[in-house]
Image (tube, helix red, strand yellow):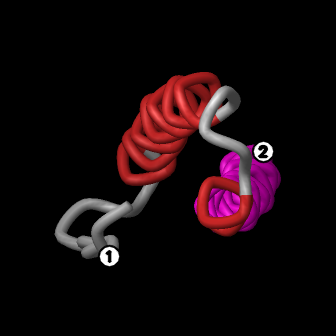
Amino acid sequence: MLNLLKRAYLLFMIRSLERELHDQREAAMTAHKDHIARIILAESETREELAKFRSAYTALLPVGEINVWPMA
């Protein structure tokens, strides 16, 4: 049961970070050139966090079950 709750939390965080990354990409399209470097840095940090949460989620899956994530 605890494993299921951890996986639910991690999946929630993964989806939240995916939405955040999407919004950052859209912001970069419309941002002033002075702000693009900060947005790119934020995207990089978000991708790193997303990779950590995906790794943690995959580690909690039952043996033999694999989850293939789309590119971020």
Residue extending farthest left? 64
Q: Amino acid at mark 1?
A: Pro
Q: Earlier in the sequence, mark 2 or mark 1?
A: 2
Q: Say which of 42 and 66 sits in front.
A: 42
**In the rendered image, is residue 1 in sight?**
no
**What x and y, as percent, mark residue 38?**
63, 23
Mark 2 secondary-structure assignment = helix
Q: What residue do we see at 18% from left, 69% from top?
A: 64
SS category of the residue bearing label 1 = loop
Q: Where is 10 relative to 27, above or below?
A: above
Q: Which amino acid type corresponds to the residue marked 2 in the rendered image?
A: Leu
Image-based side of 22 in relation to 67, left or right: right
Q: In the image, is residue 21 part of the stretch drawn in magenta?
A: yes
Q: Are marks 2 and 1 in contact (CB under 8 Å)?
A: no
Residue visible at 67% across and 68% down in the picture? 26
Q: Which residues are magenta?
A: 1-25
The residue tagged 1 is: 70
Indicate the quadrant where residue 35 lies.
top right
Q: What number is the disc on residue 2? A: 2
Image height of 14 relative to 59, above or below: below
Q: Callout 2: few (<14), some (14-19), or many (20+) C-alpha neighbours within 10 Å? A: few
> Looking at the figure, which quarter contains the C terminus?
bottom left
Whole-number angstrom distance, CA of label 2 to CA of label 1: 27 Å
How crowded pointer 1 is (Cα within 10 Å; few <14, some 14-19, many 20+) is rated as few
- Foreground: 15 or 38? 38
Which residue is depicted at the point 61% across and 29% down?
A: 42
Residue 17: percent from left, percent from top: 69, 52
Majority secondary structure in the magenta region: helix
Name the side, left or right, on which 9 lies relative to 67.
right
